[in-house]
Amino acid sequence: MSQSDNTSNACDDDNVVRRFGVLAERSDGFKQWLLDQLQTRNCRRVLDAACGTGGDSLFLLEHGYQVSSSDSAEAMLKQARQAKISHQSSNEAVQNWEIKNANWLTLSEDLPGYGQFDAVLCIGNSLICLLDPSPNFDLYRQCFENFKSMLKPGGVFMVDHRNMDIIMDHGSPINKHVYFKENTINKISSEIVKSPGKQDFVNITFDMIVDGSASDKGKQNGADTTSGINNNNCNIEKATVPLQAIRAGQVATMLAEVFGENCEQALYGDFKSAPDISDTAYFQHVITKTE
């Protein structure tokens, strides 16, 4: 996931990466949805612009896609590069897998010579890790312009984010098992942080079910990390991550403005069309570049 030059990246932290799982197995629902989106558009060349630890990139490489991966969190990229070493002996495509440090705000400059792709992905709730204090979400608009510039005409951009509408309206996030095969989140809590003259953000605290124990406590790069044991003797470790308070409608509107109001655009909730906001944990936006 990416951040602006003057904003710390909460996931550029080895402890946070470990708590959220390294190469955790994605759910069948997510994998089928992703393949369906790419296959129906005959996509072959993919930029995974929020590759994290590399799990989605590996999945697509194993399904025959040409994948280039980027992220700005070195803690994440370290794991992705290790995954490449671990998997390259059995897969030639993995041997040629390119993993780069790239910022969404300077994407074309950070990825010179890559040309344009059939698909650009910003998946894994990465988008709203970028805290944009500008009144009109100017940083988000610049990111969307840069994602668009990396797409061929007819190419598809996919971006997702947690349902912040429900938090902003009711104060509590939806804890639903959506993206991963195993549910490693015991509880989620949130706190809206208001700053006069700037966009609000939300501190999300995850009670993560993890293997083994951890002795570290502290705050690194904007993420609070603590560990402890719950009453059921299950090992619970907390990770607090600041996320942008932004509504799904605001994201959809900005995408339409950047890609053009006549572009093909769809909104999914937990991989289903016509989502019910009150029962959606994550939104997925799919938009096609028409020019």
Image (tube, rainbow, N blue to C red):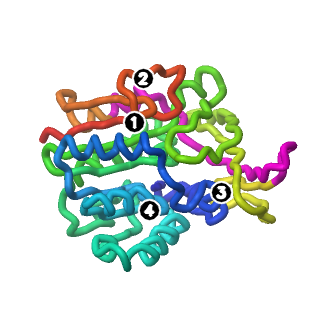
Please tell me how crowded label 3 is: few (under 14), some (14-19), or many (20+) other residues with Cα within 10 Å: many
Q: Which residue is mark 1?
A: 284
| Secondary structure of the residue carrying numbered label 1 | strand
**Mark 2 vs mark 3: which is more N-terminal?**
3
Q: CA distance from mark 1 to mark 2?
A: 10 Å
Please tell me how crowded label 2 is: few (under 14), some (14-19), or many (20+) other residues with Cα within 10 Å: some
Q: Which residue is mark 4?
A: 54
**Mark 3 vs mark 1: which is more N-terminal?**
3
Q: Look at the picture and state if 273 lies above or below 200.
A: above
The spot of residue 162 in percent (x, y) is: 51, 36
| Secondary structure of the residue carrying numbered label 2 | loop
Q: Are marks 1 and 4 in contact (CB under 8 Å)?
A: no
Q: CA distance from mark 4 to mark 3?
A: 16 Å
The quadrant holding residue 210 is: bottom right
**Mark 4 vs mark 3: which is more N-terminal?**
3
Please tell me how crowded label 4 is: few (under 14), some (14-19), or many (20+) other residues with Cα within 10 Å: many
Residue type, label 2: Pro
Task: Report the disc number at residue 275.
Answer: 2
Residue type, label 1: Gln
Q: Are marks 2 and 4 in contact (CB under 8 Å)?
A: no
Is 274 colored magenta in this rendering? no
Decide if residue 114 is in sight here. yes
Is 245 colored magenta in this rendering? yes
Identify the residue shown where x is 29% and y is 66%: 111
